[in-house]
Amino acid sequence: MKDLSDLEIIESIRNGNDSDYSLLIDRYKNRAFSMLSRMLKNNMDAEEVLQDSFLKAFTGLRNFKNEAKFSTWFYRIVYNTALTRLSGKLRKIENETSSIDDKLELQSNYDYNSSEKEDLSKFLGEVIKELPTKYASVINLFYLEGMSCEEISEVMNITVASVKVILHRSRNALKDLLISKDYIKEII
């Protein structure tokens, strides 16, 4: 069953085999969770949004038109659900404090001394979390999920040109962050 394509699994679900949806969940849960944890910067929120996203995708599956790849369609749901969660959090913060800048100030004290690849990946993941949400999302989708600029434009509902601009700015912001926080030593 795991060798089936997304479209074959979707057809099976449409034919009444709802339990086959677990195959899609298993296929996309880890990458979607990774994207969400970088966007939301909180694993519990990421888990909740992931569950919401899978539920939204399941209920919308009957209307999936196969015009895009399932993964692109699903990541768009994940991305939009995360943005909704972030905007709700931002409103809550604005209501709780008169100075949103104090609440959003990022602090970081990383102590990574290992040069192992896994540690470097974790370290970069933590640094990426410090980037603005849109930048972190594009870097995650492009580098970690391996999506093309065209697929990212579909997920984020922006033009391909905008994706390229955001990707360029994201790279520069990441480089500036690494330099300003003197993290270059950590990745060399």
Image (spheres, helix red, strand yellow):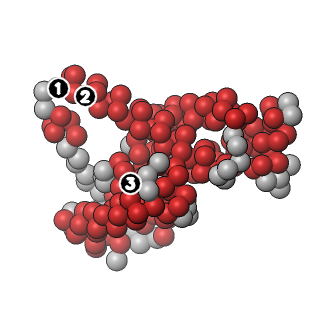
- Nearest the eye: 50 or 170: 170
> Relative to residue 149, is residue 130 depicted above or below?
above
- Nearest the eye: 155 or 120: 155
Q: Which residue has dot 3 on it?
A: 136
Q: Residue at x 50, y 56 (%)?
A: 152
Residue at the extreme left of the image, as rendered: 98
Residues tagged 2 and 1 counted as in contact (Cβ below 8 A): yes
Q: How many marks?
A: 3
x, y percent for residue 109: 25, 53
Neighbor class of circle 3 (other Cα within 10 Å; few <14, some 14-19, many 20+) is many
Q: Amino acid at mark 3?
A: Ala
Name the N-terminal-most of marks 3 and 1: 1
x, y percent for residue 135: 35, 55
Residue at the extreme bottom of the image, as rendered: 188
| Alpha carbon separation for disc pair 3 and 2 | 21 Å
> Relative to residue 141, is residue 27 depicted above or below?
above
- Nearest the eye: 6 or 27: 6
* Element assignment for label 3: helix
Q: Which residue has dot 2 on it?
A: 93
> Relative to residue 19, is residue 176 depicted above or below?
below
Q: Which residue has dot 1 on it?
A: 97
Neighbor class of circle 2 (other Cα within 10 Å; few <14, some 14-19, many 20+) is some
Q: Residue at x 46, y 49 (%)?
A: 156
121 sits to left or right of 108 = right
Name the N-terminal-most of marks 3 and 2: 2
x, y percent for residue 1: 86, 49
Q: Is residue 90 visible?
A: yes
Q: Amino acid at mark 2?
A: Ile
